[in-house]
Image (cartoon, rainbow, N blue to C red):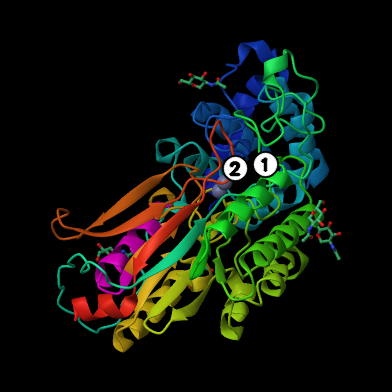
Amino acid sequence: MRLPTVSPSRGLVTFTLVLMMPLFGFCHPGQVSRQSGLVFMQQFVHQGVGFNWKNVTCRLCQTVFTIIDIALMSDANEERLAYVAGEVCSRLHLADERVCRDITELFRADFIQAVQASLLWPTEACALLVGPSCGKFDIYAPWNITLPKVPKPPVTPPSPPKPGSPQSRVLFLTDIHWDQEYEVGSAADCKDPLCCRKGSGTPSWRRREAGYWGTYSKCDLPLRTVESLLKNVDRDRPWDWVYWTGDIPAHNVWSQTRKQQLSGLINISRLVHEHLGPNVKVYPAVGNHESVPVNLFPPPFVHGNRSSGWLYDTMAEEWAAWLPEQALKTLRYGGFYTAEVQPGLRVVSLNMNFCTPGNFWLMVNSTDPANQLQWLVHILQASEDKGEKVHIIGHIPPGLCLDSWSRNYYHIVNRYESTVAGQFFGHTHLDEFQLFYDEETMSRPLGVAFIAPSATTFVNLNPVWHSISEVTVCQRTRQLA
Ligand SMILES: *[C@@H]1O[C@H](CO)[C@@H](O)[C@H](O)[C@H]1NC(C)=O
Ligand SMILES: *[C@@H]1O[C@H](CO)[C@@H](O)[C@H](O)[C@H]1NC(C)=O
Ligand SMILES: *[C@@H]1O[C@H](CO)[C@@H](O)[C@H](O)[C@H]1NC(C)=O
Ligand SMILES: *[C@@H]1O[C@H](CO)[C@@H](O)[C@H](O)[C@H]1NC(C)=O
Ligand SMILES: *[C@@H]1O[C@H](CO)[C@@H](O)[C@H](O)[C@H]1NC(C)=O
Ligand SMILES: [Zn+2]
Ligand SMILES: [Zn+2]
């Protein structure tokens, strides 16, 4: 955490502000590179669409944050700040006017609060947003979880299962992104970060309009396609259990409300339940789009209405049929849980929103948020003691996390390589995997994180669900023992 009393650098900040003010307020916007942008807004959308944050110059970023800091010091109200942010967004042509305006509204409270709580300095903010070369920031400060003193058991190299070994069939579903306002015939190539919906306008030429089932463009899914997908899943029975790794709402991140997010969560959860039936357990994970504003998941040190309680409580209610009581408790606390899938196999669902720089709340404290990784270590140690295997599921793949989080996670997977039998993630919308190697030589692969492609077509994709065949655990345990 930053130290609260460092007045010399505050002097420097004021000085910088005086120097940079012209660039910001009084210059003709045309003189500022169009490629520059207010970086924190880029977080709203997946790569390649809408705001571009890699294009922001270090200088512009520092200017923006200097202004925010000064304004906060001079007790400017949140409304004024939001207005300035909106002005910058539209003057620099970062996005369509309407998107700029809406995004400003959305960010008003949460973003400014996070900045206030962290007393963020420009160099720190820009190190966070543009990259470590643009300053230094504590969110990159290293931290270590503690591993138990129990020595790592000797590793037995895995061998392929014998032909005819009993198998489980697991459905792996991710990134549904249901657009509640999808509209057939609307423009598929609009200026907004998400198209094919009410408000996208009329298509410029016939072939670029929203289709009945979906569209190859920056569009999400209509409900009928989600239902059709689930019907197909249903036809492909039997399923032993399901991993469902998050991102239920659409990408209209500039206009979302808590009410809308919750109705999406409730509706889709019930649909999944209906289609898979009461006997198939579904293990969900919390995606970065579940919250509003997108990516912002206050860790448990934030209480009251601003906390994620509104979201986790509804999840706990909707998912109660799938998860045991203790899992619902930690879900309400921090959006993560563990449950026994079958004797000998446990699932751990992580809230990966505590690992990503997109979650501005981590500016306040990025050290093992919610003590989630330390908790993971406890679970894995208990499983090792019992001879149980563990699957880890989550939304954002561990390779896309903050350095310290990633490094600690890697270390944990190394230590518990004989216990962690599989890892399953989503978020990239693509069919990918990430490999884990032994930390000593970085040459022996010891784990793999499977990343499933999305159900949504966003962007230019086909809807997909995956099926995993899992050799039953008893078999595995016998082989490894
Ligand atoms: C951002 O930069 C890349 C290459 O540096 C360029 O291709 C792209 O057009 C830029 N995007 C914007 C919005 O200016
Ligand atoms: C974390 O552990 C690494 C490796 O053991 C060590 O080099 C580093 O100094 C530790 N960092 C902190 C902040 O304790
Ligand atoms: C989901 O939403 C649709 C359209 O808004 C509605 O027709 C349907 O009944 C809802 N389904 C559930 C299970 O809530
Ligand atoms: C809680 O916060 C939400 C979103 O900021 C707001 O819409 C709602 O009115 C607040 N509720 C209370 C009771 O303050
Ligand atoms: C940050 O969070 C960690 C883990 O939750 C906690 O141990 C630590 O005391 C916190 N640091 C500060 C400065 O609040
Ligand atoms: Zn997604
Ligand atoms: Zn995502």
Mark 2 touches mark 1? (CB < 8 Å): yes
Dot 1: element: loop
Question: Going from the N terminus, do you reach mark 2 or mark 1 first?
Answer: 1
Q: Position of residue 212 (x, y in %)?
A: 72, 33
Q: Amino acid at mark 2?
A: Thr
Nearer to the camera, 36 or 241: 241
Q: Position of residue 435 (x, y in %)?
A: 28, 52
Q: Which image quarter: residue 252?
A: top right
- Total numbered labels placed on residues in the image: 2
**Mark 2 residue's CB less than 8 Å from ligand 6:** yes
Give the distance between the C-alpha atoms of the residues marked 2 and 1, in whole angstroms: 6 Å
- Asked whether, in this view, residue 380 is left or right of residue 191, the answer is left
Q: Which image quarter: residue 202?
A: top right
Q: Quadrant of the C terminus?
A: bottom left
Q: Is residue 76 visible?
A: no
Q: Is residue 289 magenta?
A: no
Q: Position of residue 380 (x, y in %)?
A: 36, 78
Q: Which residue is mark 2?
A: 456
- Asked whether, in this view, residue 92 is left or right of residue 125, the answer is right
Q: Main secondary structure of the magenta part?
A: helix
**Mark 1 residue's CB less than 8 Å from ligand 6:** no
Q: Residues within 10 Å of mark 2 (few under 14, many from 20)?
A: many
Which residue, as the protein is rendered here, is positioned at the far bottom? 386
- Asked whether, in this view, residue 164 is left or right of residue 85, the answer is left
Q: Position of residue 119 (x, y in %)?
A: 61, 53
Q: Which image quarter: residue 11?
A: top right
Q: Which residues are magenta?
A: 402-420
Q: Residue at x 61, y 28 (%)?
A: 217
Q: Amino acid at mark 1?
A: Leu
Q: Which residue is mark 1?
A: 221
- Asked whether, in this view, residue 28 is left or right of residue 1, the answer is right
